Image (cartoon, rainbow, N blue to C red):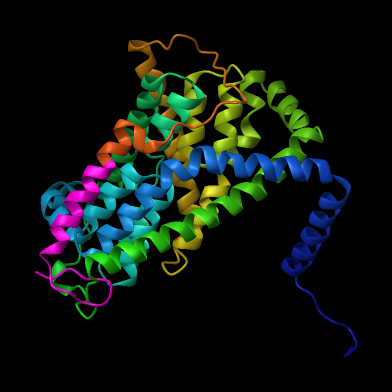
Amino acid sequence: MNGIIKVSAKTLFLVFTIFLAVFVILFYSSFTVSGIADGLLYSVNYLIPSLFPFMVISSFTMYSGAYRPIGKIFSLPVRCLFRLPRAASAAVILGLVGGFPVGAKCVSMLYSSGQITQKQAERMMTFCVCSGPAFLITAVGTVMLHNTFIGIILYVSQLISALMIGTAVGLIDKKRSAPSDDTQNSSSEQKTAAESLISSCSDAAYSVLELTSLVAIFSVLMSVIMKSGLNTVFSDMLTWFGIDTSVSSVMIPVVFEVTGACRQICSGGCPLWVLSFAVGFGGLCVHMQILHILKNVNINKPKFFLFRFINAVLSSVITYIICFFYHPISQTFAVSENTVAEPVYDSYIGAAALIVMCIIFLLSLKRPRYASFPTEKI
């Protein structure tokens, strides 16, 4: 019949979600307001100070062409362990030290310029995605837990897990020959140091704004779930299967948003390995931003989520093992609601980032002046 409009199940689901969101905003307005406020505070106190400097550094490294000397330094282990070309070396390093969105941003830029293939980009995203030292050591360790060494334990666990996954994926892919660096596209050109810095700051600001918006939305969702009792129902279900209440009560926050999950874990009496699992997984909020950054790559999403779960399990196991040799003062953590994040630039991590930025800037000054993103040439 011509008068009947056919609507797909996906469209119906989207319409239902929109009406549900409107219902929540109207009838749970107090939860919405508190959720938005919490999300913005999380971003201002934790995410922006820890992520913004590294986002600027990562983009500047790629735009200015400074990834070339970094690639030469780390090209041997990257090629042997991970079966990746030299151009990917800087992205691997920055992904491991910069935090969740930084690795994805570097991979996207390399793929867009022809430095790596789609398969290589997909393999890199199995291990170039982890919580950075600025977030784990400064925000989680120093600010939330008042114990910097616990933050170091969490970061070391993340780093070892990522290296194990990257090496394993490289060994599995060993039979496939990595494309030669000589075949990379050389049609793009390089930006000047000033242009690179301006573009890097713009990219970082946009990424931070995007992440802040997602955190605020997911914070509203978590506020509704918590205050409506849905989290308690889910927690009771997990407890019925023998999972401790302190662990089951934080599983929904762990799945959705990592910063709020970290705060709840730190104040809820969970063992340290649960916190390691949370930061190892990252949460759907971070995953949505990563997948948006990688929209030009079109990676395998089920594979991506599988490796996020594997990374979370490995990280928690490594943390559990480390705690045999170093026992935190207390396995029950507490975090004050009035805690204010210390500036990243006043920490060792911030100082190291500043030094790296200066070195990259000096390296880029000797290079010719061009107009856009550079490519690897041998």
Residue 152 location in percent, x, y? 35, 26
> Residue 239, can we see it?
yes
Q: Residue placed at 17% from the left, 58% from the top?
A: 86
The verdict on residue 364 being magenta is yes
Decide: is 34 above or below 202: above
Q: Quick one: 226 or 148, which is closer to the camera? A: 148
Q: Residue placed at 29% from the left, 65% from the top?
A: 196
> Residue 242, can we see it?
no
Q: Residue placed at 32% from the left, 43% from the top?
A: 96
Q: Residue placed at 78% from the left, 30% from the top?
A: 233
Residue 191 location in percent, x, y? 24, 71
Q: In this view, does 131 lie to the left or right of 178?
A: right
Residue 285 location in percent, x, y? 57, 48
Quadrant in which the N terminus appears: bottom right
Q: Please identify the quarter of the rendering in which residue 149 is found.
A: top left
Magenta residues, start to end: 353-378
Decide: is 298 above or below 326: below
Q: Please identify the quarter of the rendering in which residue 16 is found.
A: bottom right
